[in-house]
Image (tube, rainbow, N blue to C red):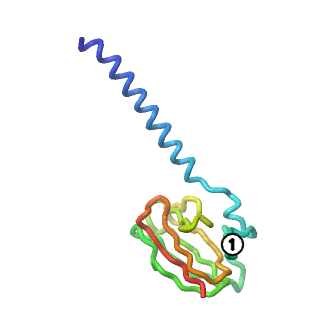
Amino acid sequence: MFINSIPRKAFYILVLSAFCIFAITACGESSKVDSSAKSDTKESNKAGLKSNDSDLKSGEISQEVLIENLAFEAATTTIKPGTTIIWKNKDSENHEVHANDGAWHSEPIEPGKTFELKFDAAGKYGYHCHIHPGMNGTIIVE
């Protein structure tokens, strides 16, 4: 009886392993974002948000938000219209920046990398890390 149960257990372990690999792969694919969200000139929504994956042009205003110790520093940032927020990942793991209303989001931000987004319209923009839902922040444009 013990000998007959070994192949069955091996089969179940194989099936479970395959399922886990599939689930991990599927989760990785769902976190990818549309590459047009990183375009320098395409608008992200009606509020006048623009994402910029390149260096700022001379004379443009920017404000840095650090991602460190599983938190956004500062959690609330107040800026003027036309300012570009630069999220810089100083943690040892990837993070993502997602608008609470779904209007914009980053791709995974690797350690040492940045994500930039220009805010042209006045308003209050809540955001969070999609990977770590307890990480929240707010951009206030006035």
Task: Provide residue 111's location: percent of width, then percent of height.
Answer: 49, 63
Task: Provide residue 59's location: percent of width, then percent of height.
Answer: 70, 86
Q: Find numbered disc 1 in the image and state the secondary structure of the residue it sits on.
A: strand
- Which quadrant of the view contains residue 75? bottom left
Residue 54 shows up from this direction: no
Q: On the rendered image, what quadrant is the C terminus found in?
A: bottom right
The count of marks equals 1
For this rendering, which residue is in front, 121 or 83?
121
The residue lying furthest to the left in this view is: 2
94 lies left or right of 49: left
Residue beneath the point at 37% across and 28% down: 13
Residue beneath the point at 47% across and 37% down: 21
Residue beneath the point at 39% across and 69% down: 69
Task: Provide residue 32's location: percent of width, then percent of height.
Answer: 59, 53
Residue 134 shows up from this direction: yes
Task: Provide residue 18's location: percent of width, then percent of height.
Answer: 46, 32
Read off the residue under disc 1.
Answer: 50
Residue beneath the point at 71% across and 65% down: 39
